[in-house]
Amino acid sequence: MYQRIFGYLLHASLSLSSLHRCSGGHDQVIHQVIGTRDYLSDDLISRDVVIIGGGAAGSYAAVQLKDMGTNIIVVEQNSRLGGHTHTYHDPDTGTANELGVVLWHNWSLVRQFFAKLGVPLARVEPKDLSNGTKQTFVDFQTGKVLPNMSFPDYTDAIRGYTLQLLKYPYLKTGFHLPDPIPDDLLLSFGDFVEKYALEDIVSLVFMYAQGLGNILEQPTLYVFQNFGLEVLQSFVFDGFVRSAKGDNSEIYEQAENYLGNDVLLGTSIVSTKRSTTGGVEALVQSPSGPKVIRAAKMLSTVPPIPGNLAGWDLSSEEQRLFEKFGNTAFHTGIICNTGLPSNRTVRNFAPDTKYNLPPLPGIYSIAPTKTQGCFRVLIGGPSALLDADVENLIIGSVKRLQTAGVYNTTQPEIRILSSHSPFELTVPVEAIKGGFYKSLYGLQGQRQTYYSGAAFFTHDSTCIWDFTHSLLLRIVADLRSEQAFRGL
């Protein structure tokens, strides 16, 4: 059974994630206008809950809260909902190719959400993830094929890894960590696999946990959250699902239709004012001008790093915690006219590194898409990357394949690049040990503000929806309690 799992996992290049940034900078001109103008009724918005960010967590929360009879408004800085779920439509053929979220777990929560919005699902069996493509292992630093590259028998490694995961059932709901935190979760993943003789699992985790940066250096806690029991269960028992039409962004397009005027796209936060008793106020800049949103509660689903929260009235505790986050980089793109064979996935490994893991920043893989002659390229790094650096990395890597005589490649046409950065948000081991996540979760409800998204769990849309659903029950309960107290 475990060997079969390996075969499925080997071909899976998944990015089960979908939190999207929605933040804005301070604009002094806007502040001057706000201070002097009288607002029209259309510029004053009153709601029960204002949701910041329209990615997986924000969109899901908005639909669910609306179903619960709660008045909401979503503030999203991009021109679409969906965040990391980003679909590229080829302009010539209209073919949909995913730049982000590829699959969801086949859970009842997912099926219910899709059914609610009228989006049909198709089940995907693990054996179908390869799409019939063959694989070549290449050192992208030289462009040379690794002829002796082979993978170990993963059977014992997967069994041993699963037994380790079973020690920590509380990881299934997020970072609800015990005190003291088990030492093994704080080990670097490189030290962890050596301690438990799980070296054979490393290349498998690397191929799945794209976007985690240098996985051998990451605390084991973060690797377990990304490549955990839920993932293994989907591969072994439940399978996955995706849009039956082959366009995963459809669920968010339907969410936008369902929410109607309760979504402000292309809108960024200018400033916030949050009270311990009097609700929240957000000044936003929308395409039609500045608006003031007043709400009883705020749900923030953006990556909580200071650069995303300019203009927010952060408390000293929020500032202290959010400043501890570092983040990795993850980028995807569609490239065409490369000269690469249309039936082959090219994966990046190194000939002389530990476990043959390639240095990052670098390409993870280049794989065929549904559009003839076009490929999806995945790029990762341990820290932020500029778009220009990503472009140069792609072009240089493809060119080296020709120089090395592997393929008759040409300079690729980059159709689109999609940045998913800041991606994995992590903190140092000492911060984890010092109760960082207990303090982070302790922010829930303070000054009428709640938080969800990948930083509070992991980059997995299904798990984010599940985490968010539990949080919504608390938000609604708090709202109703306050309304009852006021006699409303």
Image (cartoon, rainbow, N blue to C red):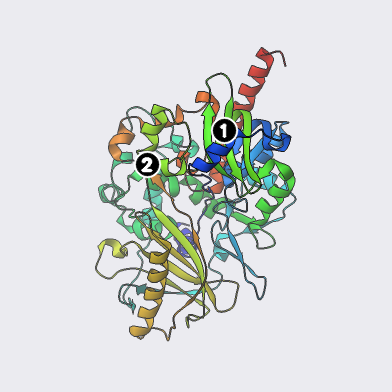
Dot 1, how many residues are within 10 Å of its Cα: few (below 14), some (14-19), or many (20+)? Answer: few
Q: Is residue 251 left or right of residue 303?
A: right
| Amino acid at dot 2 | Phe
Where in the figure is residue 397, as x and y percent of width and height? 37, 74
Asked if residue 140 shows in the view, the reply is yes
Helix, strand or loop for disc 2: loop
Helix, strand or loop for disc 1: helix
Looking at the picture, does residue 377 appear above or below residue 30? below
Along the viewing direction, whichever of 225 and 388 lies nearer the viewer? 388
Extreme residue toward the front, this view? 36
Residue 395 disc label: none
Q: What whole-number distance in Å separates the C-alpha atoms at marks 1 and 2? A: 34 Å
Looking at the picture, does residue 132 appear above or below residue 326? below
Along the viewing direction, whichever of 21 and 158 lies nearer the viewer? 21
Along the viewing direction, whichever of 201 and 406 lies nearer the viewer? 406
Residue 35 disc label: 1
| Amino acid at dot 1 | Gly
Q: Which residue is mark 2?
A: 325
Q: Quadrant of residue 142?
A: bottom left
Looking at the picture, does residue 47 appear above or below residue 485? below
Q: Is residue 171 left or right of residue 369?
A: left
Give the residue drawn at x 55%, y 79%: 373
Sequence-wise first label, 1 or 2? 1
Where in the figure is residue 231, as x and y percent of width and height? 50, 50
Give the residue drawn at x 37%, y 69%: 348
Dot 2, how many residues are within 10 Å of its Cα: few (below 14), some (14-19), or many (20+)? Answer: some
The answer to whether marks 1 and 2 mark residues whose Cβ atoms lie closer than 8 Å is: no
